[in-house]
Structures are given as C-alpha cells and as structure tokens.
Amino acid sequence: MQRYFLEHQHQDGDQVTLNAATTHHWVVVLRAVVGDTAEFVDAKAHLFHGELLTADTTAATIRLQAVPTPAVELPAAITIACGLPKQEKAEWITQKATEMGVAHVIFYGADWSVAKWQGNKVAKKLARLTKVAHGAAEQSHRLRRPDVTYAPTLQAVLQSAYDHSVMAYEESAKQGEHSALKTALQAVTPGQTVLAIFGPEGGISPAEVTLAQTAGATLVGLGPRILRTETAPLYFLTAASVLWELQ
C-alpha cells in the first residue's frame, strides 16, 4: 500500500486535506479514486489508513483510521556525517541511507573534499536532498523522515552531543583492526544517539582524525576492503541493523 507523510499530529476519524504534492502523486500519477485507501504517517509517527473522500487534480480529502503502528525504525538514532562527495553521490547516499533507517544525514566540508558547496547553493542542494529523503522514507515504509543538513567543517559537526560516536578510518582496516565497530555498536542501547563520521573520496585528514578523537570518537575499520565514500555509510548502517534488529 502506498505511504505518505502528514505534517501534523492527528487522531482516529480526522478528516485531512492533502497537500498538492501528495494529491498529485496519489490522484494523478497513481490514479486513485474516491474510496481508495493509502497509508499515512502523522508528525508523531502514528500510522493510519486514509480513505479518499474527495479528489480532483489539485486537492484531495481523506478520513483517517488509526491502525497498529509496526516497529520499523532502528532502536537507536544514527546520524551519518559524510565528507562532501563528488557529483551526484550525495543523492545516492541520502536515498539508500534513508531506506536503511538513518535518522539524520550531514554533509560536511572535509579538509580533503574535492566537491565544494558554495554558500548561495547550499539551500537549493538541501531542498533537493530533503525531497530525495522524503521519497525514500515513503518507499521504504519508514515512520520518520530523516533530516538532511550541511556543516562547513567537521568541527561544526562535532559541536552537537551524541551518546556514541565513531569515525570510519581506512588506516584501522589496513592495520588489521576488526572488532572496534562491533564493540561500539554492541555498546549502544535503545533510545541512544550515534554519530558515524565518514570521509570524502580523498579520505580523512590527520587533523580531522585528531579532532574526532579529541571529541571522543572511536576509530573503527569497516572490514579488510577499502570502501568507496558512498558505500561506507551503508556498510555501517547494515552492521547496525544486523546487530540490533536481526538477533
């Protein structure tokens, strides 16, 4: 069943007027007609079935029926901080990380980032990435849509507090370290927050490693192979899911 997100909190029996984007997708693209039903998630992550009451190409009204809300979110909130990648990789990371349960995606200007986000283009890029995240959250039947933000430096990322923080560091993998990631993830308890830091294509600078360690981050390897900048965050999210959800 198609899923959409609502901007406000609702309760059983509410009648809601859908926004133009949702109306267009459901009524125009998917050709929904009066009497059809889709899933809707409100601002408090409550799940409803919404019956289409009225519809035209610009506006639609639904009646909500509360249904049991399944546990589909990761038990701990993961933020991934990714050094600015080249070309369209930011969209790919955002989409796939959303499907895998991320709570927050930060793209930061790393010391060795080739890509640069000019000040006057940041808002436009974030708007596009937020749209990608919202679409992926609907497709993967999430209950929450992740935030997508930008930080000019890693130091700016580290200003926020997290219960646990790690940095994926390829030198750890080269040196044969293979248990720090598992140990770090197993230390996380439900409801806690986790920051995972990843470098751009050029890697993480020594200054950034020192900065992260000073802030309390643990250096972890991601297996014996060197992963691309767009693959590493997904490896981390997969490992978290296996350890937290598939026991």
Image (cartoon, grey):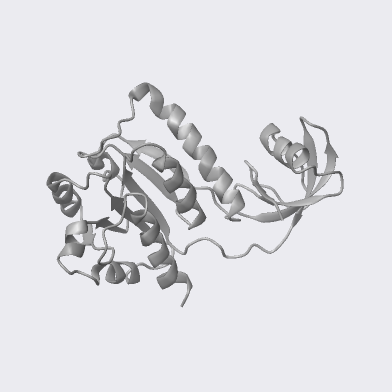
The answer to which quarter of the image holds residue 181 is bottom left
Locate residue 42 relative to residue 23 in the image: left or right: left
Locate residue 238 relative to residue 135 in the image: left or right: left
What residue is at 38 percent from the left and 36 percent from the top?
87
Locate residue 64 relative to residue 80 in the image: left or right: right
Which residue, as the protein is rendered here, is positioned at the far top? 120
- The image shows residue 235 at horizontal and vertical percentages of 37, 61
- The image shows residue 51 at horizontal and vertical percentages of 81, 49
Q: In the rendered view, tell whether residue 177 sits above or below residue 39.
A: below
Q: In the rendered view, tell whether residue 69 sits above or below residue 120.
A: below
Q: Nearer the viewer, residue 97 or 51?
A: 97
Work out which quarter of the rendered image holds the N terminus and state it.
bottom right
Whether residue 53 appears in this view of the structure is yes
What residue is at 47 percent from the left and 38 percent from the top?
129
Which residue, as the protein is rendered here, is positioned at the far bottom? 247
Number of numbered discs overlaid on the protein picture: 0
Whether residue 44 appears in this view of the structure is no
What residue is at 65 percent from the left and 43 percent from the top?
6
- The image shows residue 15 at horizontal and vertical percentages of 79, 43
What residue is at 20 percent from the left and 47 percent from the top?
204
Q: Nearer the viewer, residue 35 or 66?
A: 35
The answer to which quarter of the image holds residue 205 is top left
- The image shows residue 117 at horizontal and vertical percentages of 33, 29
